[in-house]
Image (spheres, rainbow, N blue to C red):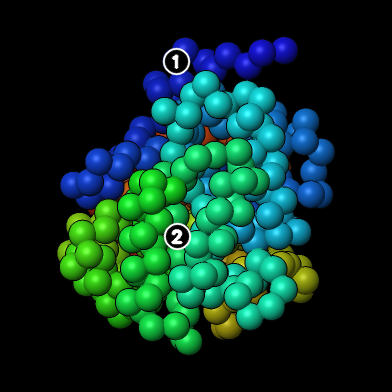
Amino acid sequence: MVFAAAENRYEKLPYRRVADTGMILPSLSFGLWRNLGDQKPLSNSREVILNAFDNGIFSFDNASNYGPSNGTAEETFGAVYAKDLKPYRNELVITTKAGFHMWPGPFGEFSSKKTLVQALDLSLQRMNLDYVDIFYAHRWDPNTNLRETAEAMDLLVRQGKALYVGVSNYTTEQFNAIAEIFAELKTPFIGNQVSYNMLNREAETTGLVQAVGEQKAGLVAYGPLAEGLLTDRYLDGIPSDLPLHWSNKVMLENGNDVVIAKLNKLNDLAKQRGQKLSQMALAWLLRDSRVASVVIGASRTEHLLDNLKFSDNMELSVEELKIIDDILA
């Protein structure tokens, strides 16, 4: 059956311009990190991806190491793109990243020129693309000088393999350092993709959100629900084997009971707003215009559609923001 996108797809979800650039992102982007690689049947992945597009999500976020097996998430997206989404290429923002372990040997990770060039070539092959809209350096490289990394990414733009570049998981100092080089090279630099949610506010406390604004770039937040903690799933307890992302493990350092108490108070406030906790958590992130988009993941369509309902009530009053700050303090 030939896929035809919903005609009202751009009425479903607000979208945002990244600072003063020409890049526009939906308030929610769809990430293929864990859910749609080699562990899920393609039919399920296709259903979720196409439902995301039908509901206003036109940005799809990937990485060379997503899968779980390296490259399989890109292959999954590439299969759906080739079969269903290729006619809509001019509408899509497709992003990928390179830097975590991707293949054997010393060039299979980090951000040397050789690694980045080869990684993007492989990503384009897997996704059946001629170019990506944004290519990210996935993490800071302590071994390669920063100028080499920046110049390699600039080269990829000039070769037409990426329209914009960004970084991911860079600290404020690291972000400012590479932004300075990109400005000198006149590379279209879009911003920083980092872990950011109600329970992990490091992007705020380290000054990264402020730095992104000063550099006229955007912050793309991943992990907005903290691997499910910011849902109603763990209000009665957090399992000891919950697979938290490395960036979120700090949130449990004062004990599970402290977090559970916060979650229940936040959930009570969300109920007063007529929302689920997860929906309020998404609205809270997007209260700041410097947050260009929030990356969500879903392995089932019902979970995706449930998250999309956050847009029914995105406004948080000054009083509500104060209550949230008090709970999280």
Split into 4 quadrants, where in the image is the C terminus? bottom left
Asked if the residues shown at circle 1 and circle 2 are in contact, with their CB atoms under 8 angstroms apart, the answer is no
Q: Which mark is residue 8?
A: 1
Position of residue 138 relative to residue 156, above or below, is below
Q: x, y (%) of residue 78? A: 64, 38
**Which numbered disc, 1 or 2, marks the residue that appears first in the sequence?**
1
In the rendered image, residue 191, in percent from the top left (x then y), is placed at 33, 59
Q: Is residue 297 left or right of residue 7?
A: right
- Image quadrant for the N terminus? top right
Q: Amino acid at mark 1?
A: Asn
**Which residue is at 61% across, 42% downward?**
127
User: What residue is shown with label 2?
Assistant: 136
User: Can the viewer see residue 157 in this picture?
Assistant: yes
> Which image quarter: residue 204?
bottom left
User: Hey, what amino acid is under mark 2?
Assistant: Tyr
Which of the pair 327/220 is nearer the observer? 220
CA separation in Å, label 1 and label 2: 31 Å
> Where is residue 51 drawn, in percent x and y?
60, 27
User: Dot 2: few (<14), some (14–19), or many (≥20) neighbours within 10 Å?
Assistant: many
Circle 1 packing at 10 Å, graded few (<14), some (14-19), many (20+), is: few
Check the image and report above or below for 126 versus 110.
above
In this rendered view, identify the residue nearer to me: 323 or 136.
136
**Residue at horizontal 53 percent and vertical 56 percent from the top:** 120
Q: Nearer the viewer, residue 294 or 169?
A: 169
The foreground one among 299 and 112 is 112
SS at mark 1?
loop
